[in-house]
């Protein structure tokens, strides 16, 4: 497996194997892309919120994504719980953010909140993602059957 550099990300976008819309050049990092919040939100202490990304992403069958919260937010008490973004996924991403701090934490629409690191698989997935969150738009709650 290989982590894509910023220039690799641009090359894969040009080849059509990766899509990030809307793309912001200031969000491109040396080893990933900073995803922006699609909404204004204030997360109170000991509460959590689901927040969707402004960006729509589309991953080819050889690329998966690993998410992490930006360190500035962890320093304010926010933690994020994120799933792996499977090869073949397309849509906006929903992030779960929990405030373990003692003060409310605000996130402005368009603010960079999480980083996605793109990882190349050794070979293309034979079964790219086609699950219930495919083509997600906005904040999407659990679709788990129980």
Image (cartoon, helix red, strand yellow):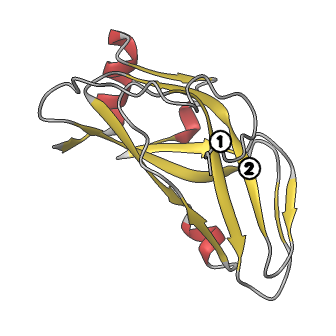
How many marks the image carries: the answer is 2
| For residue 23, above or below residue 1 | above
Residue 138, picture quadrant: top right
Under circle 1, the secondary element is loop
Under circle 2, the secondary element is strand
Q: Which residue is mark 2?
A: 51
The residue at 66%/58% (across/down) is: 96
Within-10-Å neighbours for mark 2: few <14, some 14–19, many 20+: many
Residue 75 visible somewhere in the drawing? yes
| For residue 120, above or below residue 134 | below
Residue 32 on image: x %, y %: 41, 44
Question: Along the line of sight, which residue is nearer the eye, 105 or 125?
Answer: 125
The answer for how far apart the CA atoms under marks 2 and 1 are is 16 Å
Q: Nearer the viewer, mark 2 or mark 1?
A: 1
Residue 113, which numbered label? none
Within-10-Å neighbours for mark 1: few <14, some 14–19, many 20+: few
Q: Residue furthest top?
A: 15
| For residue 21, above or below residue 140 | above
Q: Quadrant of the N terminus?
A: top left
Sequence-wise, the earlier of marks 2 and 1 is 2
The residue at 57%/53% (across/down) is: 114
Residue 4 visible somewhere in the drawing? no
The residue at 68%/63% (across/down) is: 97
Q: State left or right for residue 118 relative to residue 36.
A: left
Q: Residue furthest front?
A: 146
Residue 50 on image: x %, y %: 74, 54
Q: Which residue is mark 1?
A: 143
Q: Residue furthest bottom?
A: 102
The residue at 39%/24% (across/down) is: 88
């Amino acid at each position: 497996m290989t982590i894509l550099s910023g220039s690799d990300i641009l090359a894969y976008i040009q080849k059509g194997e990766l899509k990030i819309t809307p793309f912001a050049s200031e969000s491109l990092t040396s080893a990933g892309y900073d995803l922006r919040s699609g909404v204004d939100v204030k997360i109170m202490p000991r509460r959590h919120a689901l927040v969707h990304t402004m960006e729509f992403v589309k991953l080819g069958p050889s690329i998966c994504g690993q998410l992490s919260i930006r360190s500035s937010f962890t320093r304010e008490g926010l933690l994020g719980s994120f799933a792996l973004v499977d090869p073949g996924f397309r849509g906006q991403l929903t992030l779960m953010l929990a405030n373990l701090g003692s003060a409310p934490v605000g996130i402005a629409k368009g603010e960079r909140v999480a980083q996605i690191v793109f990882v190349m698989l050794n070979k293309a997935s034979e079964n790219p993602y086609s699950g219930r969150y495919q083509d997600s738009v906005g904040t999407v709650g659990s679709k788990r059957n129980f």
